[in-house]
Image: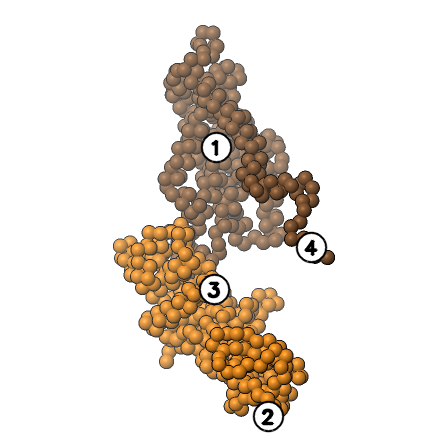
Chain colours: A brown, B orange
Amino acid sequence: MIAPAILPARGAGDRLTGLFWRRPAVLVALLILPPLLWLGVIYLGALAALLLQSFYAIDEFSGIVVPEFTLKTYAELLRAQNLDIILRTALMAAAVTLASAVLAFPIAYYAARYARGGWKAAFYLGVMLPLWSSYLVKVYAWKLILAKEGILGWAASATGTGFLIDGLLAIPGFEGSSLSTSPFGTFLVFTYVWLPYMILPMQAALERVPASMLEASADLGATRAQTFRTVVLPLALPGVIAGSIFTFSLTLGDYIIPQIVGNSANFIGMAVYQLQGTAGNIPLAAAFAVVPIVIMLAYLWLAKKAGAFDAL
Amino acid sequence: MTVAVEFHSVSRHFGPIRAVDGVDLAIEEGSFFAMLGPSGSGKTTCLRLISGFEKPSSGTIRIFGEDVSDTPPNRRNVNTVFQDYALFPHMNVRDNVAYGLMVKGMRRTERLAQAEEMLALVKLEGYGDRKPAQLSGGQRQRVALARALVNRPRVLLLDEPLGALDLKLREAMQDELKALQIRLGLTFVFVTHDQHEALSMADRLAVFNEGKIAQIGTPQEIYDRPRTRFVADFVGSSNVLPPALTRALGGPEAWSSLRPEAVRLVGAGPVTGTVTALRYLGSGTRVMLDTDDGTGIAALVPAGQPLPEEGARVALAFDPAALHVMEGAP
């Protein structure tokens, strides 16, 4: 028997496939409608509500939010004590991002270029494993590690290197009775907690740089340092930027780590937490929440201007 | 004559795989040398040994007399045109071409001027501001060529550079490459798996098989007098005759090769066969036949001459001088 040239539909699923083939837009619409609703209504809607709140102000006597447009809250945001919080948070986020990038690059480079088979699996496990345990557990564990009686202090006194920690804690800006109460401790914990978010996009970007590109550079006479600067870094930059968006914005918004480790100086996240909770000043909390958004937009704009996305 | 590249019993083993196995070879300065072989035959590894991306497991490589065992790629005055071109996607064409001069510290205005000059040489004037992604395959290939040539290398290595181009463009580039090589007087080392390309462009060529050089010589030597069955099979469309058939045709009892254009089809003779297929080639027709002992033979019948029909019984005749007995068989 000769098979027919056109096969009949094999049921409802097959007819649906036919519909999608005739009208590809239907499939696309079906696929993106739920996430679009989620993003558009719940996510962007909430963000808009937040923005709106920041243009209201609180009545100083009654403590009630007055739903009238005013820039009073933003004027309040720009007070010296609040600017202090913003500057401290931004500096911390920048330092954490920089340190993460420097630490992550060799790891990501090794994983992308040299790790094969079992070593690659070990890399992914090693990077992801810390993400599987609770964030709070990790932060408290670090508090113990960094405490005066912690393993670091113990190891330092046992090896007679306690002067290193003391010296570190004497640096202006890092003062504290121990690492766990010093801003340097806050920095260490931030860097530890967010490092995987830098490694993974970096590794993905480096993996996309073909090996022949590096060979071509060496072939044309470049030293390893020149190849790194002129070929590897520009091509990996989108990944570095993606990673830095994570580390930067996660640090900007976090309110738990600076509460547990460090000298309890206020960060943006803590300010938001206090303002919307105990102080009940929702408009100022909203204005504070707008700051990271503005910083990130400025950062992305600068990165784009600097040509960070040219290789995309 | 100066020897540009010299291999002295060079081997490169990857674990149990002998990618290159005891290769001796000398490439003369100013010559167009082709390395021909099927994939996995070791030709590309040989090229990478010259550029320095592979180190020999044993043996020595000399470039213009100097042992390069401890010389990294960036300090060898040898440049490569890569198979995938490996152009830097984040730089425009001009910066790509000027790259080698930049890393050597040449001033910007000077290196860009030289890059422009080189772009003119490969007929890409006015393309300097484009990104590689905006070019066609053939244009990218020229940029890769210009980027290598701008450094004035002593030896230019080409790793299957024409493989990704369509037939028409490939033929045009073959002519251009050959003309460029003669004009610049440079030593070109060209890796290819395309026998026509190797035969038509090279002054000398090495045929690789399983990590070893099966034969080395001029295109004519290799085409006319293949040393082994492998060479005869791979390089030519030559017929390879087993010892019994060679003997039946009046030769010694050894493997031999016979070019299709030397075979004539006649009514009667010592060896007969059946026509199995006809392939029209334009300039003639290739007649495929099976001899009675089961050997496949191709005969090229020039246009205008009478053709047998499929299934017809024919006998073979040929000019005895055309029968080449191979020494190194099988």
Front residue of A145/B173: it is: B173
Label 1 sits on what residue type? Ser
Q: CA distance from mark 2 to mark 1?
A: 87 Å
| Residue A116 in sight from this viewpoint | yes
Badge 1: how crowded within 10 Å, few (<14), some, or many (20+)?
some
| Residue B6 in sight from this viewpoint | no
Q: CA distance from mark 4 to mark 2?
A: 56 Å
- Please determine whether, in this image, residue B19 is positioned above or below residue A302: below
Label 2 belongs to which residue?
B250
Quarter of the image with the C terminus of chain B in it? bottom right
Q: Quadrant of residue B308?
A: bottom right
The numbered mark, 1 or 4, whose residue comes first in the sequence reads 4
Q: Is residue B90 left or right of residue A199?
A: left
Q: CA distance from mark 1 to mark 4?
A: 61 Å
Tag 2 secondary structure:
loop
Q: Residue furthest top?
A: A61
Q: Nearer the viewer, mark 4 or mark 3?
A: 4
Q: Find residue B163 and name its label.
A: 3
Labels 4 and 3 positioned on one and the same chain? no
Q: Residue furthest right?
A: A1
Front residue of B222/B189: it is: B222
Chain letter for mark 2, please.
B
Q: Residue at x 46, y 18 (%)?
A: A53
Label 1 belongs to which residue?
A249
